[in-house]
Amino acid sequence: EVQLLESGGGLVQPGGSLRVSCATSGFTFSGYAMSWVRQAPGKGLEWVSGISGSGGNAFYADSVRGRFTISRDNSKNTLHLLMNSLRVEDTAVYYCAKSLGDFAPLNFEYWGQGTRVSVSS
Amino acid sequence: QSVLTQPPSVSGAPGQRVTISCTGNRSNIGAGYDVHWYKQLPGTAPKVVIYGNNKRPSGVPDRFSVSKSGTSASLAITGLQAEDEADYYCQSYDSNLNGVLFGGGTRLTVL
């Protein structure tokens, strides 16, 4: 059974940093692209970032490029998202999602339950 | 405002057929990228209901189907049931943005 379990969310001040993680099991982690998708309160889904199975290619939405860094540890089956220079508008539930393929995050087959990030002074 | 445009809401009576549209442009749907559809119940994570190639994950009934033409795609649900009431999102890829796009979401109400 595929499982994705996010952690690391919390309350942070504007300009601060936070790292969220996603522990996975039930599939060959290194064989699949992974992504972070967020949902602000009462809003729709927004893709944030994706990474290829090998970790050699990373993709970012314009809204977070230069501030967020996605990474993965294939030895620990874990996905990370380091968020710097956080803004109030980054407040959202952050979901980890697994793609069908190994390179680009073109679709989302499985989702975690999400971790809540709140940016406020 | 999302690059992929969905109607904010649709509704139908049990047993009826409803469609949800997703309109993009030549750099996403019109460029041939697949459009996938996700269902989200309140307070829960989204789940894929159907992929752009009309493939449904295990457990999703064949009442769900997709179509695509030009720069638009549609999700059709036949034999509407109360359990279908949820928010639905379309998703594709955009070559200009070099990234993934979601539609703004459509709230489906079963009357």
Image (tube, helix red, strand yellow):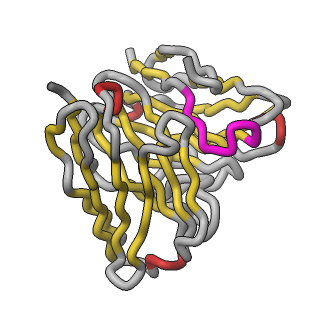
Stretch of the chain drawn in magenta? B95-103
Q: Where residue B49 appears, x then y in whole percent?
A: 50, 46
Seen from the viewer's position, the closer of residues A70 and B75 is: A70
Horizontal relation, residue A72 to residue A114: left or right: right
Q: Is residue A98 visible?
A: yes
Give the residue furthest to the bottom: A75
Q: Quadrant for residue B29, please give it.
A: top right
Can residue B102 be found in the magenta stretch?
yes
Seen from the viewer's position, the closer of residues B36 and A10 is: A10
Quadrant assignment for the C terminus of chain A? top left
Give above or below for A22 relative to B63.
Answer: below
Horizontal relation, residue A35 to residue B94: left or right: left
Q: Where residue B36 appears, x then y in whole percent?
A: 61, 44
Seen from the viewer's position, the closer of residues A19 and A95 is: A19
Horizontal relation, residue A105 to residue B53: left or right: left
Give above or below for B78 relative to A79.
Answer: above
- Residue that appears at 44% across and 38% down: B39
Q: Where residue B48 appears, x then y in whole percent?
A: 48, 48
Horizontal relation, residue A40 to residue A68: left or right: left
Q: Quadrant for residue B78, please give it.
A: top right
- Residue that appears at 43% across and 65% down: A71
- Residue that appears at 37% across and 85% down: A75
Q: Is residue B58 visible?
A: no
Can residue B50 be found in the magenta stretch?
no
Q: Quadrant for residue B31, please give it.
A: top right
Tell how many labels: 0
Q: Where residue A102 appears, x then y in whole percent?
A: 60, 70
Give above or below for B48 relative to A56.
Answer: above
Quadrant assignment for the N terminus of chain A? bottom left
- Residue that appears at 52% across and 43% down: A65
